[in-house]
Image (cartoon, helix red, strand yellow):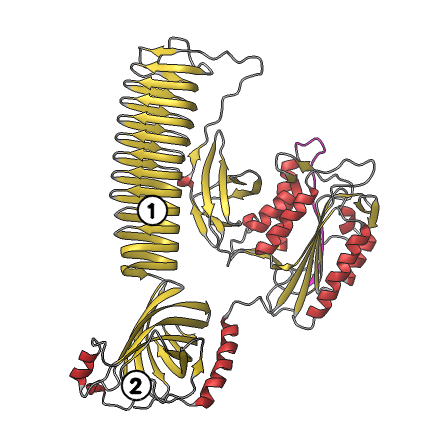
C-alpha cells in the first residue's frame, strides 16, 4: 500500500487553488466603470424659499443607482447643500479616478444628478451661482466616455438648450460597443418652474425618475431601463401629474449627443433578486410605500404584461387605485427575495367616513338592538360605548365594546372589545380583542388579539395574535402569531409564527411554521414538522421529509430534496493511492457527502485498501466555476480478504479513523458533467484513532497546534 504523495505537487497545488478560487468568486462587470455624483441643495440663497425635498431626493437617486444602476457604493458621492467650490473639488476627485480607470476599462461613465434651485443662467448653491457653462466644463473635464447629467430645478431646460435637443440614433450599450458623448435631462423647460409635492415627499420629476429606474419605465419588458425609456416615462408622468397644479404643466427637456448603437441602459433589473413582480393580471396605477411610511414608487401597470419593481429589503404596502375604491396588499421582502403579486392578492381598502368639523355628533353611551339590522339610537352613530346586539346589533364604530348572544356587527372599525356567543363581524379594522364561542370575522385588518372556540377569519390582514380551538384563516396575510388546534391558513405573507396541530399554509413566510405539515411559498426562516414544503427557502427545514425548489440554508431530515440544489455523483483519484466514489446532496449552498473507495491498482473485488467517509460542506458558484469545501470523518479498514475488511469497518480496535477535509475548484461542463481538482487533508492527532499505523511514514506533514498534524494529498476527478 502506497502512503506517500509527491511533494512537488503540493506547493503548486496551493497556489493554483488560490488562483482558481479567486476566479470563481463574483466580480464586477469588467467592461464598464460607472461613477455617480449626486447633489441636493435645499438652500438657494437670500430671497428664495428653502426647499423641503431636494437633499432627500439626491439621497434617493443615489440609493437606487447603487442598488440597480451599476454604481458601486465606493464610486458614489453625495453632496448636501454644497458651495460651488465644493462641487468643483468633487468633480476633480472623480476626474482623477476616471483617469486611472480609463486604462483598465473599455468604457467609463459618470452620472451627475442635481436637485435644487436654478435660474436660466445656472445653479444656485446657497449664496453661490454656478453657470451652466462652468457646469458643462466640469462634466467635460471629468473625462468620462459617457456623461449623463440630470437636473431637477427651475428653468433647467436652459442647460439642455445650450446645444439643442434633438435625438440621434439610439445609443449604446452592448458591452463590446465603443460609445462616447453625453446625455442631459432637465426636469423643466427654460422658462418653467420645477415643482415639489409634500404628498409625494419629493419633486414630481424625481419621483417619477426613481419609479422609472426601479422598473416602471421598462416598456419593452426586457428587465432593463434605458435612457430613452426613462426620459419618456418621467416626462409623460410629470406632465400628467402637474396639469392641474397652480404652477401649471411641467415639461421635461433633453439633449442627447451619443455616438454608437443600441440603447444606453441605466438600470438592469434582470439579475435583481429583491423585487416585487407584478403579474399579467394586474392593471391600474400602483403606489408602493414603506410600511413604516414614505412613498417609494408609483407605477402605471398595464394588463397583459409582467412588470418587475426593484426594491431594497423591507416591508411595503402596495395600493392599487381603482375607479371608485382602492385596494391594498402588504409584502415583506427579505434580502435577495422576489415576491410575485397578482390581482387576487389585493383586498378592498375600507376608507374612513369623513365629517365636517363641528358636525360630529357626540358619542352614544349605549346601543341596544332587538330587531335584526336596526338600532334604537338611530343609524350609524359615530361612536358607541356599549352595543348589546340581542339578535344582530350594528354600530358604525364601537369605541367601547360589543356583546351579542347571536351576532355583533361593526361596519368599519372596532377599538375595544367584541364578545359573542355565536359570532362577531367587523367590516373594517379590529384594534383590541375579539372573543367568540363560535367564530370571529374581520373584513379589513386585525390588530391585537383574536380568540375563538371554533375559528377566526381575517379577510384583510391580521396582526399580533390569532388563537382558535379549530382553525385560523387570514386571507390577506398575517403579522404576529397564529395558533390553532387544527390548522392555520394565510393566502398572502406570514410575518411571525404559525403553530398548529395538523398543518400550516402560507403564501409566503417570514418567521417560523411549526406543525405536522407546513406548506409555504418563499420562506425566510424555519419550517419545523414531519413534512415541510417550500418554494424558495432561506433558512432551514427540519422534518422527516423536506421539499423545496431552492434552498439557501441547511435542510435537516431523513429525506430532503431541493429541486435546484446540489445533486452530484463523483469519482476522484487521490494521489496514487485510492479511487473514491461519492454522492453530494443538499441545498443550493450546503450539502452532505458520503463516499467509499479502494486502493488503486489493487484487487477491487477483494476490497483492498477499503475506505469510507462522510461529511458536510458548502459550495460557492460563479458559473461555470465552482468551489467546494467539506469536512468530516474518514475510516480506513484492514484485513486479509474482503470479508475481513468489511467486518473491520465496524471494529474500533482495527483500522484507522480520523478527521479529514477537502477543498477543490471545478468547472461545469454542461448541465451535469464537471471536472475538478483539489487537495485533501487528513488529520492525525487527539481526535484520530490509528490502530493500523496508517499515518506511519507519510510524507509532507504540516504541523498544526498541539499534537495535530495534517497530511496533504492532491486529487482530481469528475462529477456527474
Residue 692 in which image quadrant: bottom left
- Precedes in sequence: disc 1 or disc 2: 1
Tell me where residue 638 appears, x and y as whole percent: 23, 84
What's the CA distance linking mark 1 and mark 2? 50 Å
User: Label 2: how many residues lie within 10 Å, few (<14), some (14-19) or many (20+)?
Assistant: few
Query: Which residue was labeled with disc 2?
Result: 693
Query: From what the image shows, is residue 662 above or below residue 480?
Result: below
Q: Is residue 367 visible?
A: yes
Position of 279 with respect to 224 (left or right) is left
Query: Which residue was labeled with disc 1?
Result: 513
Tell me where residue 550 appears, x and y as whole percent: 38, 58
Q: Residue at x 45, y 68 (%)?
A: 621
Residue 248 on the magenta span? yes
Residue 677 on the magenta span? no
Q: Which residue range is magenta in the image?
A: 244-259
Residue 427 in which image quadrant: top left
Quarter of the figure with the C terminus: bottom left
Q: Residue at x 31, y 48 (%)?
A: 519
Amino acid at each position: 500500500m502506497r502512503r506517500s504523495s509527491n511533494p512537488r505537487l503540493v506547493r503548486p497545488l496551493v497556489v493554483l487553488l488560490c488562483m482558481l478560487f479567486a476566479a470563481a468568486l463574483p466580480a464586477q462587470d469588467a467592461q464598464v466603470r460607472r461613477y455617480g455624483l449626486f447633489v441636493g441643495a435645499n438652500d438657494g440663497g437670500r430671497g428664495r424659499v428653502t426647499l423641503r425635498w431636494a437633499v432627500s431626493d439626491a439621497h434617493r437617486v443615489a440609493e437606487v443607482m447603487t442598488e440597480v444602476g451599476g454604481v458601486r457604493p465606493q464610486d458614489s458621492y453625495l453632496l448636501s447643500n454644497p458651495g460651488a467650490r465644493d462641487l468643483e473639488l468633487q468633480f476633480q476627485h472623480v476626474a482623477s479616478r476616471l483617469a486611472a480607470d480609463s486604462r483598465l476599462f473599455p468604457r467609463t461613465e459618470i452620472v451627475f444628478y442635481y436637485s435644487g434651485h436654478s435660474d436660466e443662467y445656472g445653479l444656485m448653491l446657497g449664496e453661490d451661482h454656478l453657470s451652466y457653462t462652468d457646469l458643462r466644463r466640469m462634466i467635460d473635464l471629468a473625462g468620462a466616455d459617457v456623461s449623463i447629467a440630470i437636473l431637477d430645478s427651475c428653468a433647467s431646460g436652459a442647460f439642455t438648450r445650450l446645444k439643442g435637443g434633438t435625438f440621434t440614433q439610439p445609443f449604446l450599450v452592448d458591452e463590446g460597443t465603443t460609445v462616447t458623448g453625453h446625455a442631459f435631462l432637465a426636469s423643466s423647460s427654460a422658462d418653467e418652474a420645477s415643482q415639489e409635492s409634500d404628498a409625494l415627499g419629493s419633486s414630481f420629476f424625481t419621483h417619477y425618475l426613481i419609479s422609472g429606474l426601479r422598473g416602471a419605465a421598462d416598456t419593452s419588458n426586457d428587465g432593463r431601463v434605458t435612457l430613452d425609456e426613462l426620459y419618456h416615462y418621467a416626462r409623460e408622468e410629470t406632465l400628467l401629474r402637474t396639469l392641474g397644479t397652480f404652477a401649471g404643466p411641467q415639461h421635461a427637456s433633453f439633449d442627447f449627443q451619443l455616438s454608437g448603437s443600441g440603447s444606453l441602459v441605466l438600470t438592469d433589473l434582470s439579475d435583481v433578486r429583491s423585487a416585487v413582480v407584478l403579474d399579467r393580471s394586474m392593471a391600474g396605477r400602483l403606489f408602493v410605500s414603506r410600511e413604516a411610511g414614505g412613498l417609494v414608487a408609483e407605477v402605471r401597470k398595464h394588463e397583459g404584461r409582467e412588470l418587475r419593481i426593484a426594491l431594497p429589503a423591507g416591508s411595503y404596502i402596495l395600493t392599487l387605485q381603482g375607479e371608485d375604491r382602492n385596494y391594498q396588499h402588504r409584502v415583506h421582502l427579505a434580502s435577495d427575495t422576489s415576491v410575485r403579486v397578482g390581482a387576487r392578492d389585493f383586498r378592498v381598502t375600507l376608507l374612513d367616513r369623513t365629517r365636517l368639523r363641528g358636525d360630529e355628533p357626540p358619542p352614544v353611551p349605549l346601543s341596544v338592538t332587538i330587531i335584526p339590522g336596526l338600532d334604537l339610537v338611530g343609524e350609524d352613530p359615530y361612536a358607541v360605548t356599549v352595543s348589546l346586539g340581542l339578535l344582530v346589533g350594528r354600530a358604525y364604530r364601537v369605541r367601547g365594546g360589543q356583546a351579542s348572544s347571536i351576532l355583533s356587527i361593526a361596519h368599519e372599525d372596532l377599538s375595544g372589545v367584541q364578545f359573542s356567543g355565536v359570532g362577531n363581524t367587523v367590516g373594517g379594522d379590529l384594534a383590541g380583542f375579539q372573543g367568540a364561542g363560535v367564530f370571529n370575522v374581520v373584513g379589513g385588518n386585525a390588530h391585537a388579539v383574536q380568540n375563538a372556540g371554533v375559528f377566526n377569519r381575517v379577510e384583510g390582514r391580521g396582526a399580533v395574535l390569532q388563537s382558535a380551538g379549530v382553525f385560523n384563516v387570514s386571507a390577506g396575510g398575517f403579522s404576529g402569531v397564529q395558533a390553532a388546534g387544527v390548522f392555520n391558513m394565510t393566502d398572502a405573507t406570514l410575518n411571525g409564527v404559525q403553530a398548529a396541530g395538523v398543518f400550516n399554509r402560507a403564501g409566503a413566510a417570514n418567521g417560523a411554521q411549526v406543525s405536522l405539515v407546513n406548506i409555504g411559498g418563499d420562506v425566510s426562516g424555519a419550517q419545523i414538522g414531519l413534512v415541510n414544503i417550500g418554494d424558495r427557502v432561506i433558512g432551514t427545514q427540519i422534518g422527516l421529509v423536506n421539499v423545496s425548489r431552492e434552498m439557501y440554508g441547511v435542510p435537516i431530515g431523513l429525506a430532503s430534496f431541493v429541486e435546484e440544489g446540489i445533486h452530484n455523483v463523483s469519482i476522484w483519484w487521490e494521489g496514487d493511492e485510492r479511487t473514491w466514489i461519492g454522492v453530494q446532496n443538499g441545498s443550493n449552498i450546503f450539502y452532505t457527502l458520503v463516499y467509499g473507495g479502494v486502493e488503486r491498482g489493487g484487487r477491487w473485488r477483494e476490497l483492498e485498501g477499503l475506505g469510507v467517509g462522510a461529511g458536510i460542506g458548502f459550495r460557492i458558484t460563479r458559473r461555470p466555476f465552482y468551489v467546494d469545501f467539506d469536512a468530516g470523518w474518514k475510516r480506513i479498514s484492514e484485513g486479509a480478504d474482503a470479508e475481513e475488511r468489511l467486518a473491520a469497518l465496524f471494529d474500533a480496535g482495527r483500522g484507522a479513523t480520523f478527521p479529514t477535509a477537502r477543498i477543490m475548484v471545478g468547472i461545469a461542463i454542461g448541465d451535469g458533467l464537471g471536472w475538478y481538482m483539489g487537495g485533501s487533508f487528513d488529520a492525525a492527532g487527539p481526535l484520530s484513532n490509528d490502530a493500523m499505523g496508517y499515518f506511519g511514514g507519510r510524507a509532507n506533514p504540516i504541523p498544526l497546534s498541539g499534537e495535530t498534524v495534517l497530511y496533504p494529498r492532491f486529487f482530481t476527478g469528475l462529477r456527474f
